Structure formats: C-alpha cells, structure tokens
Amino acid sequence: MASPFATFTASAWADLRAATPMPLTDADIESLRGLAVGLSMEDVEHTYLPISRLLNLRVAAWRQLAITTQTFLSQPPVHVPFIVAVAGSVAVGKSTSSRILQALLAKWPDHPRVELITTDGFLHANSVLAERGLMERKGFPESYDVRRLIDCLSAIKSGANDVAVPQYSHLTYDVLDEPRPLLERPDIVIVEGLNVLQTPASSGQPEGSVFVSDYFDFKVYVDAPAPTIRDWYVDRFLALRDTAFQNSQSYFRRFGDLNDDEARTVASDIWGKINEPNLTDNILPTRERADLVLTKAADHSLAEVRLRRV
C-alpha cells in the first residue's frame, strides 16, 4: 500500500529551506532551548526553517481559500487565525519545537502575531484530579478539561477578540487561578500538548462529537524511539533535581536531595508507570494523523521527516 507520506532524510529536508534567511540570533536560540535539550543554530536552520517556509506557504493558501468562500457567501472578510498543533510524548522536545516555530513564524511579514498555547493549562486542578483518583494519571486524556479547551479553540476560530487561556505552573504542578489574555487578533496560534491529535473514538467520546483536533489547520508530531525518549526524560529529571526541584515552593522539592542513582531510579519508575503507558496507549496512536512527523535521533538532531501528501 502506498504511504500517504513523503519521506525525507535530514539533508534532503534541510535543502527545502531554499533561500529562507535565518532571522534568529545565537542569543535567541539560547533563550528558546529547553532544559536538557540540545539545540544549535544548525538544528534551527536545517529542521525548523523549512517548516517555517512550508507553514508560511500554507497560511497564504489557507487565507486565499477563506477569501474564496467568503466571496461565494457574499460575506466580508473575517480575521481568523491559522492553528498549528504540536503533539508528542513527554520529554520529546515538543515545547522547544513549539517555541522555535513561534519565533520563526513571527518573523514573516504576513503573520507577525503568533501565539503559543500549551494544553497544560487545561488540565483539571489537582484538587479535582485528587477527588477523582487521577493524580497518577495526570497527562492522560481523562485528566484534561476537554470541554474548556474546545470552547477556547472555538472562540479563537470564531475570531473572538477577548479570548483568555488558563495558565499552568510547573513549579507548583497545578493550574493557576488567573488566565492570561491572548494577543488580540493573532495571525497564527500554536497549540502544544500530549494528546491534542486524539479523535473522539480514541478518547472515548461519542462518535460525531466535536473534538480538539477538529480545529487544527496543520498538525506536527515530534517523534523519537521510546527508549530514547525515556533516556531524555531521565536526563531532564536530573537537570530539574539540580534546578527547579531545589525551590522550596516546588511540588517536587522532595526529589531535590536525591543522589544520582536515586534520582535515576525514581525517574525510571515514573516513566514506566505513567509516561510510557500514556505514550503507548494514547499519544503514539495519533502520530499517523499528523501532517508532519519529525523523528529525532538520540542526540536530538533530525533523523527523518515525513510530510503528508494526501
């Protein structure tokens, strides 16, 4: 059976940058780098500049199609943002990828207003998760307030000017009380999260119901072999032990004094009990729904790209 994807090696994908100039500086890239995630100027040039160019072309074509429909309906033009989803496992680097894309896309003159939403803010509060016995399943589909996320995306796609999104603190490991307002009339909105590509069928929702992925105009999945992601998760846990976990306000302060062996044991246990089952059962099955799959090597460099062609 023919694949719906065109597959590119890292070098072939880098060539698709064409003549797109690099708008970011070394200082910009340093500020975008994630914890325990390698990121170089070359990575941005070879991996993310081609995506930026592709999305710029897609946004232009999407806008023209919208104008065609509005002309047919004899309606005035409505400013509606193009929505990009970025999905993938915990620790795979999707947050870093999202920040890079936000920075690059905002440099194009046709869409300078780019917002980034993380679905962490749409998790149920810890008090709700504890009441429902879901604290050990945080990040699984049932731990999110999906209705609130759908309402938010619906408002964005309706061109609303007063959309606010809930915020999440990775320090306190809980949803914050105060939402933040989005930029007024954003051109592009990037939505980053673990389970954003799920369908009603895969999430246990009734068939025919509206779901999060219905609002996306382009979908990216950041991928790597599960054993590699596990190693990255452990490395990130060790980095957090020496930084955020040292803060007295941190929900994970109890891990701040672990030695290396103890920290690796705890991280491996969390990965095996929570993150790996979520990846296997809920996240990985959505990969084939993406328009673009970025597969990373063990050193975080690009290994392969698959781009949906049908």
Image (cartoon, rainbow, N blue to C red):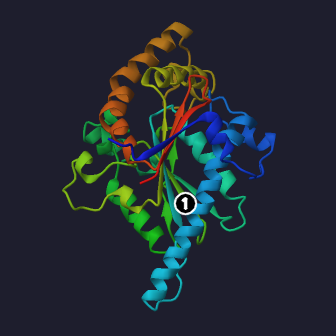
Q: Tell me: residue 131, above or below residue 176.
A: above
- Asked whether 139 or 256 is in front, the reply is 139
- In this view, the residue in front, 203 or 67, is 67
- Residue 291 position (above or below residue 280): below
Q: Residue 46 sits in which quadrant?
A: top right
Residue at (46% x, 52% y) in the render: 309
Residue 180, horizontal then vertical, whole percent: 55, 60
Q: Is residue 242 above or below residue 195?
A: above
Q: Dot 1 corresponds to which residue?
A: 189
The number of numbered badges drawn on the structure is 1
Residue name at image x 38 percent, y 56 percent: 213
Give how far across and how far down residue 202 sits, in percent: 26, 46
* Residue depicted at x 42% and y 42%: 194
Q: In which quarter of the image is the N terminus?
A: top left
Residue 297: percent from the left, percent from the top? 56, 26
| Horizontal side, residue 143 vs residue 54: left or right | left
Q: Can you see residue 298?
A: yes
Mark 1: amino acid: Val
Q: Is residue 136 visible?
A: no
Q: In this view, does 183 lie above or below 306?
A: below
Location of the C terminus (image quadrant): bottom left
- At 37% from the left and 56% from the top, the residue drawn is 212
On the rendered structure, is 33 left or right of 221? Answer: right
Circle 1: element type: strand
Residue pushed farthest front?
Answer: 1
Q: In screen coordinates, is 193 left or right of 113?
A: left
